Amino acid sequence: MGKSASSKLLFHSSDWSFKTLGTAYNAIEAIALDELGLDVYPNQLEIISSEQMLDAYCSVGMPLMYQHWSFGKRFVHEEHAYRKGHHGLAYELVINSNPCITYLMEENTMAMQTLVTAHAAFGHNHFFKNNYLFRQWTDAGAILGYMEFSKKYIAKCEERYGTSAVEAVLDSAHALMDQGVFRYRRPPRLSSKKEQERARERLEYEEQTYSDLWRTLPRATGRPDPKEAEQDALERKKVLNLPEENLLYFLEKNSLILEPWQRELLRIVRVIAQYFYPQRQTKVMNEGCATFVHYTIINRLFDQGKISEGSMLEMLHSHSSVVFQPHFDDRRYSGINPYALGFAMMQDIERICNQPTSEDRDWFPDIAGSGRWRETLLDAWANHRDESFILQYLSPALIRKFRLFQLTDEADNKYCEVASIHNERGYAEIRKALAKSYDVGANQQDIQVVDVDLLGDRQLRLQHTIKNGVLLEESSRDATLRHIRHLWGYGVSLAGIDAQTGSVRYECSTAPAGG
């Protein structure tokens, strides 16, 4: 490489410095904003050690996270596996916040720092800021302030009420995190200042005026009139807004035994659960977007002569490892790699827009041959989640590339049936089935609060809507019910109702209330 070509390089060795990081960042930013048209939050890059990286993603990947024994348990497990060489660490960690925080490992080479900056600080950042799920369901501007408040609040509760008392509430709340989100109605926006003010008022005033009135209410006696009982049930369901899908929210607002500080702990846990909910619905899109962005940017930098061949090979080696898809009979196979599927689909969209086949024109008449691949991707990143993205953009060409087909596996049969193959009808069915597998709402167990008589037996009645005959695993079901009872204070029952027939498949309950 000549002297003039060498002078254009962003860096010349594997060692990084803050100066070379800044130079690389500026070059990446120019391509990301000017050529790809990305729209990002202001970036904040932080360099951390491998131990700090372990600590960060063992505490659910959030800065300023409160302390809990489960995070320490996971840290010990992950550290042991890392030291033994069983697996590596993430090269980066990115926080959906404003400013967007990206943690970079200090052990990374300069080539890897360049790659992960493009991946996280621009790919993930753009997706967080523009995707409709994150815009509607999370508040990037308030989450850091709220986490700071949460950490201080929980530490103050531990000082006042004891670590064991706080951990007991958090243990039960953590067990209900999957059922502690709003899936269909939008949660209220966060305001860190209001949260802190409200918490201070609760600790200093509301606890002093806490009433134990519910415990002293007499229990109903005699046999009520059936019509009156039905009318009472309708009225109380209306007052309590039942059925309620968010169990943590219902317990926070209506539990008869929780003190104000305990309700605040439930709120903290459900806010964190809600914060991560969009990420569960956009794993393929989010990682695909970030991978496509970093791949496009590093290739553009190489074309501009700003990255050497050696550095490019290092980046491509890492990229290939990330998007590697093991075959079904490979012992490393654990399902479809979201990086591989997302990246392949986004590259395929670029191909369809620029070099379509006659098949592409039949399947994607609106974008085939348009040349508008940037606009198409920006629109998809903003307006889709995994399920709808796959349903709209998975092409027959990609189905063949991934060798996808559909099996029908009935429990009563001793064989599997190949239901969809590579033909016109088969492609549509395969795409539909794959999209459905990424529908978080459809695949998550539907458990809701359906009734509770606060003036009667105070038993909390839950209903599990059984889909496709899939029942709850008994031991974890019963353990979770005990956690709910711990937070509710009285008996809890659960009925499994078949979604298709409406028949009761099972009923179970905790021990009756003892007071």
Image (cartoon, grey):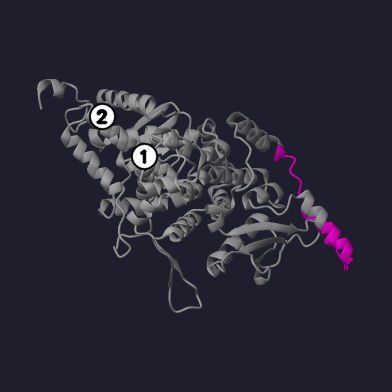
Pointer 2 or 1: first along the chain:
2
The question of residue 219 being in magenta is answered with yes
Task: Name the quadrant containing residue 44.
Answer: top left
The amino acid on which the numbered mark 1 sits, given as a three-letter code, is: Glu
Q: Secondary structure at mark 1?
A: helix
Q: Quadrant of the C terminus?
A: bottom right
Residue 259, image x, y percentages: 67, 46
Residue positioned 37% across, 42% down in the render: 352
> In screen coordinates, is 35 left or right of 470?
left
Given residues 398 and 30, the one toward you in this image is: 398
The question of residue 346 being in magenta is answered with no
Residue 278, image x, y percentages: 51, 44
- Residue range highlighted in magenta: 206-233
Is the residue marked by circle 2 packed among few (<14), some (14-19), or many (20+) residues within 10 Å? Answer: some
> In screen coordinates, is 449 left or right of 64?
right
Q: Which residue is mark 2?
A: 301
Q: Which residue is mark 1?
A: 350
The amino acid on which the numbered mark 2 sits, given as a three-letter code, is: Leu
